[in-house]
Image (cartoon, grey):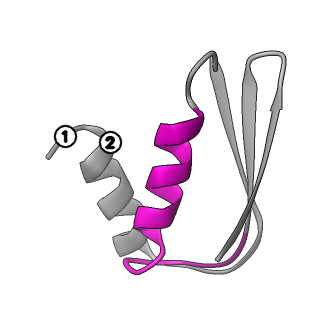
Amino acid sequence: MTITTTKNNGCLTLELEGRLDTTTAPELETVIKNGLEGVDRLVLDMEGLAYLSSAGLRRSEERRVGK
């Protein structure tokens, strides 16, 4: 998966390309964690994803809430 990040006026936009699944979800999680300082809005642009696994989303959500 390729992640392109853009920060503008407190908004972090992540443009995702490729596959989001259990293998690539940790990469997305790391990019989000490292980019949140000074951010009050997060935009995930998933238009470029060829595959989106519910397991990949679930893993990211579990890590976000500390499970």
Numbered mark located on residue 41 in the image: none
- Dot 2 surroundings within 10 Å: few (below 14), some, or many (20 or more)? few
In-image side of 27 versus 62 (left or right): right
Residue 51 or 29: which is nearer the viewer?
Answer: 29
Magenta includes 31?
Answer: yes
Residue 56 or 29: which is nearer the viewer?
Answer: 29
Residue 19 or 53: which is nearer the viewer?
Answer: 19
Magenta includes 27?
Answer: yes
Count of numbered circles in the view: 2
Above or below, 41 relative to 66: above
Q: Which residue is rendered at x = 57% and y = 22% of the image?
A: 37
In-image side of 28 versus 65 (left or right): right
Instruction: Identify the residue under disc 2.
Output: 64
Q: Which residue is rendered at x = 41% and y = 81% of the image?
A: 23
Report how far apart the C-alphas of labels 1 and 2 lie in the structure: 6 Å
Magenta part of the chain: 17-35
Residues at marks 1 and 2 touching, judged by CB atoms closer than 8 Å: yes
Q: Position of residue 24 (x, y in %)?
A: 48, 75
Numbered disc 2: secondary structure: helix
Numbered disc 1: secondary structure: loop
Numbered mark located on residue 66 in the image: 1
Q: Position of residue 43 (x, y in %)?
A: 70, 39
- Dot 1 surroundings within 10 Å: few (below 14), some, or many (20 or more)? few
Q: Position of residue 49 (x, y in %)?
A: 71, 75
Q: Which residue is rendered at x = 83% and y = 16% of the image?
A: 9
Residue 48 or 24: which is nearer the viewer?
Answer: 24
Quarter of the rendering occupied by the N terminus: bottom right
